[in-house]
Amino acid sequence: MSMSLRNSLPEIVTETIPGPKSAELLKIRKNNVTDGVGMLAPVFVDRAEGAMVQDVDGNRFLDFVAGIGVLNIGHSHPEVVEAVQKQAERYFAPNLNVFNYAEYPKLAEKLNEIIPIEGEKETILVNTGAEADENAVKIARRFTGRSEIICFAGAFHGRSYMTMAMTSKCKPYKTGFGPLPQGVNRFPFPYCYRCPHGLEPDSCGMHCLKMFEESYFLEYVDPEQVAAIIMEPVLGEGGFIAPPREYMTGIRKLCDKYGILLIADEIQAGYGRTGKMFACEHWDVRPDIVVSAKSVAGGIPVACVTARKDIMEIFRPGELGGTYCGNALATASALKVLEIMERDDYCAKGRHIGEVCMKRFLEMQKKYDIIGDVRGVGAMQALEFVKDPVTKEPAKEECKAIINECMMHGLVVLGAGVRDNCIRFLLPLVITDEQMNAGLDILEKAIAKIAGK
Ligand SMILES: Cc1ncc(COP(=O)(O)O)c(C=O)c1O
């Protein structure tokens, strides 16, 4: 019975979406939950397996969002379910500040083995991506004794105050929530499709990198006051934009030259999504601190801050941590997820999905002018929609209409980009080829309809 959902294809059986049962539940949500929490699919989940979600009315959706990158391992992986059930029978939350339990240090040991930081490392576990980024900043400031943080245009780091300050997009994330914390300096990201300096990628001479020493470090912030540069190796919410290799390696060199720590925010890009375990491995760049979360635990909240041992060694008991951090259910789940990812080569799955999607997207781009840019690394791919390929005017309404049209045919996809004109694809890495192709067919029909072809 349950195997059939895992391998099934999308099917809409109700006349409308939401169907009647979801519509009833939506009334409860509407009356009791603030609209401040976003909603993509107006349906309620009955069960979910692999890349498929079945709603309470019996509609089957293909999930190309995977909990926003949380479910690289897919919904309800049977071995992960078993590991969590077994753990639940023993204990949930001894709290590492009180009692020791093996899952926390064992997960730290595993992360210290696989996280691409040079030399010896140590890890702390927290609960959310934002909390992990907050801790990375806290650690960097304390270690360097410096106050300033550099972040980038297009970045998303979370909704807590410091991470909101480091996040780029104003609406809906920042507007009206000020004052925001000090010490945050934002510089342009190498978004080559819309070069912030108006240059062409092949002839730009890495102008954006040169700007650090020619301008930013003279006019905006003294590098000797900078504790860390925090960077998503591939922008997530910003629209899946990967910087050129030279830029990444150049940032590492600047960090070395000025004693700045490099924090890689791998929260969305990590754990096989880009076809390598961590995205910064594509550029052979070794950060000083790596922040990871989302897909590490197959859907149970845990986030990880891993850093050079000499950085982590300076802290005294009580300076880091929190009540629920490294909860035993999450750590047991993460240990199983990482075991499966290595055993079943999830990085290869990420590369395969990336190849299939990229080929299809490039074919679609030839047919539909509305697709301005096709980009991504591995299975972290995005389409950017424009009204005109020459002017590149963002096609925000059309993008929304394509997302909606997909939903009506059983494919859930998510928007991205500061201009709200991108769709990002976060297919669970366990998706079958048949499901992937079915989803891409629905997407193409939706694009053709909205593009008027
Ligand atoms: C790159 C990145 N950093 C940080 C966060 C914040 O994570 P959380 O929502 O768990 O606080 C996200 C969430 O989408 C993210 O994609």
Image (cartoon, rainbow, N blue to C red):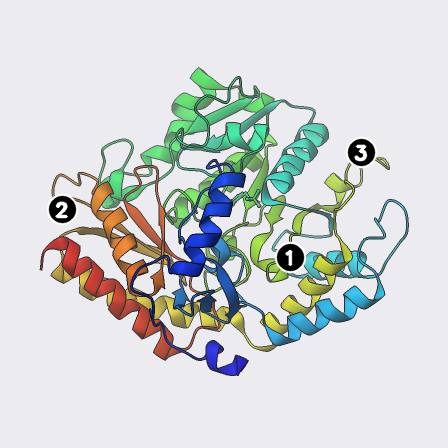
**SS at mark 1?**
loop
User: What residue is disc 3 on?
Assistant: 319
Q: Amino acid at mark 2?
A: Pro
> Residue 385, can we see it?
no
Q: Amino acid at mark 1?
A: Ile
**SS at mark 2?**
loop
User: What residue is disc 1 on?
Assistant: 300
Q: Tell me how many marks there are.
A: 3
Left or right of 227, for residue 327: right
User: What residue is disc 2 on?
Assistant: 389
Q: Residue at x 19, y 66 (%)?
A: 363
Bin the neighbour count of mark 2 within 10 Å (Cα to Cα): few under 14, some 14-19, many 20 and up.
some
Q: CA distance from mark 1 to mark 2?
A: 41 Å
Left or right of 443, for residue 79: right
Q: Which mark lies nearer to you, 1 or 3? A: 1
- Image quarter where the C terminus lies is bottom left
> Vertically, is 176 above or below 317?
above
Q: Quadrant of residue 450?
A: bottom left
Which mark is first along the chain, 2 or 1? 1
In the rendered image, residue 45, in percent from the top left (x then y), is placed at: 49, 61
Q: Say which of 275 and 6 sits in front.
A: 6
Bin the neighbour count of mark 3 within 10 Å (Cα to Cα): few under 14, some 14-19, many 20 and up.
few
Q: Quadrant of residue 332?
A: bottom right
Q: CA distance from mark 1 to mark 3?
A: 25 Å
In the rendered image, residue 320, in percent from the top left (x then y), is placed at: 77, 37
Q: Amino acid at mark 3?
A: Glu
